[in-house]
């Protein structure tokens, strides 16, 4: 939105009676879908400051920069982390399946999806987060949404991590314009320097930094600008997911 507003602000300087228009804009009453942006663009078109083709390009560029903005409008954590994330992954990799006791008689919800492989199943836990601007803590999610090229500070908390319950992790990070994927063996999570207890238990009740990570049943890793490079070797493109899962499982 910030880039669009800057573009429109630049174009508005070319208007006739731009001060009068700015005053009108400040007192404009809006009811969707008739908002301030459609008002500005209509004026720009009427004064031939932009052409119809210019408008189409502006529109297409905005859509491309915000392909996944709708994901930030999903307010339910379960709706985002389970419903949306699972559906998205199963769409781009159809061999991913929901587990049942038919495939795994011991299944009790310990992991999220599985991938059939050489007569066995690879147990997969899915974790998803959204890239938010840390300096807009009180703003709605869609206003905090960052694009993948942003240099602003962000925090993505991957939590409820249970390495002993799965073979492989798939992490998703949603940005305004793209989705990033990381595929990691469970031991990579368990040995990550920032893996820490999410809840106290007998082994980690003091939460000291010297705790044994192998004894953490449920933990979390907070990914920020400072440590995102720690998972860089495990980032893959969407079409590489299946092979990456198999490689991590067999490693």
Image: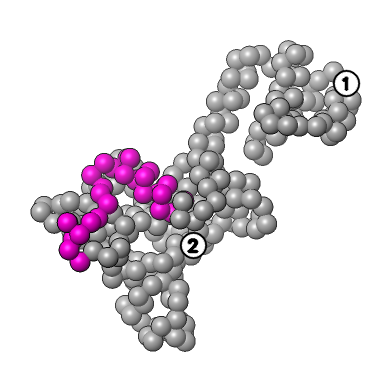
In the image, which is nearer the foreground, mark 2 or mark 1?
2
Residue 56, placed above or below residue 96: above
**Label of residue 157 in the image:** 2
Q: Position of residue 53 (x, y in %)?
A: 60, 15
* 200 part of magenta stretch: no
Earlier in the chain: of badge 2 and badge 1, it is 1
* 84 part of magenta stretch: yes
Decide: few, some or many residues near mark 1? Use Cα within 10 Å; few <14, some 14-19, many ≥20: few
Asked if one can make out residue 247 in the rendered structure from this viewpoint, the answer is: no
Asked which quadrant contains residue 21, the reply is top right
Closest to the observer: 83 or 3?
A: 83
Query: Magenta residues, as a range?
Result: 80-106
Disc 2 secondary structure class: strand
Residue 116, placed above or below residue 60: below
Q: Are marks 2 and 1 in contact (CB under 8 Å)?
A: no
Q: Position of residue 231 (x, y in %)?
A: 39, 59
Q: Is residue 15 left or right of residue 108?
A: right
Among all residues in the image, which is located at the extreme left? 119
**Label of residue 17 in the image:** 1
Q: Residue at x 34, y 69 (%)?
A: 162
Q: Is residue 147 left or right of residue 186?
A: right
Residue 241, placed above or below residue 251: above
Disc 1 secondary structure class: loop
Asked if one can make out residue 229 in the rendered structure from this viewpoint, the answer is: yes
Q: Residue at x 45, y 55 (%)?
A: 78
Q: Residue at x 85, y 18 (%)?
A: 16
Q: Position of residue 102 (x, y in %)?
A: 17, 56
């Amino acid at each position: 939105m910030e880039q669009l507003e800057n573009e429109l602000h630049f174009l508005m300087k070319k208007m006739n009676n731009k001060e009068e228009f700015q005053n009108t804009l400040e007192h404009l009453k809006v009811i969707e879908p008739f908002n301030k942006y459609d008002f500005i663009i209509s004026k720009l078109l009427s004064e031939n400051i932009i052409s119809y083709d210019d408008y189409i390009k502006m529109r297409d560029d905005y859509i491309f920069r915000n392909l996944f903005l709708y994901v930030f409008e999903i307010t339910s954590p379960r709706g985002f982390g389970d419903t949306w994330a699972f559906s998205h992954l199963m769409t781009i990799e159809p061999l991913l399946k929901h587990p049942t006791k038919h495939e795994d008689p011991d299944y009790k919800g310990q992991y999220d999806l599985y991938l059939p492989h050489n007569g066995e199943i690879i147990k997969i836990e899915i974790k998803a987060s959204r890239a938010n601007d840390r300096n807009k803590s009180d703003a709605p999610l869609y206003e905090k949404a960052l694009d993948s090229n942003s240099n602003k500070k962000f925090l993505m908390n991957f939590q409820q991590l249970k390495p002993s319950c799965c073979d492989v992790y798939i992490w998703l990070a949603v940005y305004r314009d793209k989705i990033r994927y990381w595929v990691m063996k469970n031991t990579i999570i368990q040995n990550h320097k920032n893996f820490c207890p999410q809840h106290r238990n007998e082994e980690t009740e003091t939460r000291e930094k010297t705790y044994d990570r192998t004894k953490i049943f449920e933990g979390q890793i907070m990914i920020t600008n400072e440590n995102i490079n720690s998972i860089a070797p495990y980032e893959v493109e969407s079409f590489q997911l299946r092979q990456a899962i198999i490689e991590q499982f067999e490693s």
